[in-house]
Image (spheres, coloured by chain):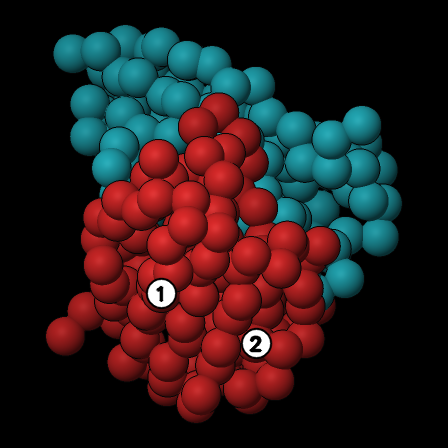
Chain colours: A cyan, B red
Amino acid sequence: QKEVEQNSGPLSVPEGAIASLNCTYSDRGSQSFFWYRQYSGKSPELIMFIYSNGDKEDGRFTAQLNKASQYVSLLIRDSQPSDSATYLCAVNQGGKLIFGQGTELSVKP
Amino acid sequence: ETGVTQTPRHLVMGMTNKKSLKCEQHLGHNAMYWYKQSAKKPLELMFVYSLEERVENNSVPSRFSPECPNSSHLFLHLHTLQPEDSALYLCASSQVRGANTGELFFGEGSRLTVL
């Protein structure tokens, strides 16, 4: 079983729609969770982090965490073509940041 | 200056060559990392240095040799590599290393091709 699992996509949504990106993790003891965005040919950059169960909102982005289900998600409201990128889920396991393979998001004008 | 800089950005080497990748961070961070990114695979953690001490070596082959002379500089020495080592090598830094550490600042990467 992969430690951090994401659907590789591509996920295609129309401009203005909500994009929903999902991630599951295997280590039940994980305490901190992160979403990175990676544009093609660029390095990853942190966009959200969440530590507690529930929702955390930052502008058009909402991170959701359900530790019982070992599930973390990222919602992007009012998606824009500039949001087209690969989104990497990362989980801190024992001080090591473990990444999923990423979900490619394409927002069509 | 950008936060984390890596050189060279592109490197082509033969299997018998010896080369080095360099990383420098200007953020005053205490932890530095090497990650390997291959197509369609998750980022793989290779090495972690905290306060210039290697604290993690993720079962990386000995043909990769890291060096951290101070908290601002990190090197990855390469020798007798294999074609499957071709990948993007990313350096990152963080303020500290711990259970909630997840805010990594990445360099732009060094694209390595082994012929």
Front in this rendered view, residue B89 or B13: B13
**How far separated are the C-alphas under marks 1 and 2?**
17 Å
Circle 1/circle 2 CB separation < 8 Å? no
Q: Secondary structure at mark 1?
A: strand
Q: Position of residue B107 (x, y in %)?
A: 31, 59
Q: Secondary structure at mark 2?
A: strand
Q: Position of residue A68 (x, y in %)?
A: 84, 37
Residue B59 seen by the camera: yes
Residue pictured at 58% horizontal, 69% vertical: B48
**Residue marked by disc 2:** B49
Nearer the N terminus, badge 1 or badge 2? 1
Quarter of the C terminus of chain A within the rendering: top left
**Tag nearer the camera, 1 or 2:** 1
Residue pictured at 48% horizontal, 25% vertical: B40
Q: Quadrant of residue A104?
A: top left
From the viewer's perspective, tell me whether residue B52 is left or right of residue B28.
Answer: right
Residue pictured at 84% horizontal, 52% vertical: A29
Residue type marked 1: Ser
User: Looking at the rendered structure, which numbered label has been put on residue A100?
Assistant: none
Query: Disc 1 is attached to a residue of which chain?
Result: B
**Residue marked by disc 1:** B20
Query: Disc 2 is attached to a residue of which chain?
Result: B
Residue B93 seen by the camera: no
Front in this rendered view, residue A96 or B6: B6
Q: Is residue B66 above or below residue A13?
A: below
How many numbered tags mark residues here?
Answer: 2
Q: Position of residue A12 (x, y in %)?
A: 36, 10
Quarter of the N terminus of chain A within the rendering: top right
Q: Position of residue A15 (x, y in %)?
A: 23, 15
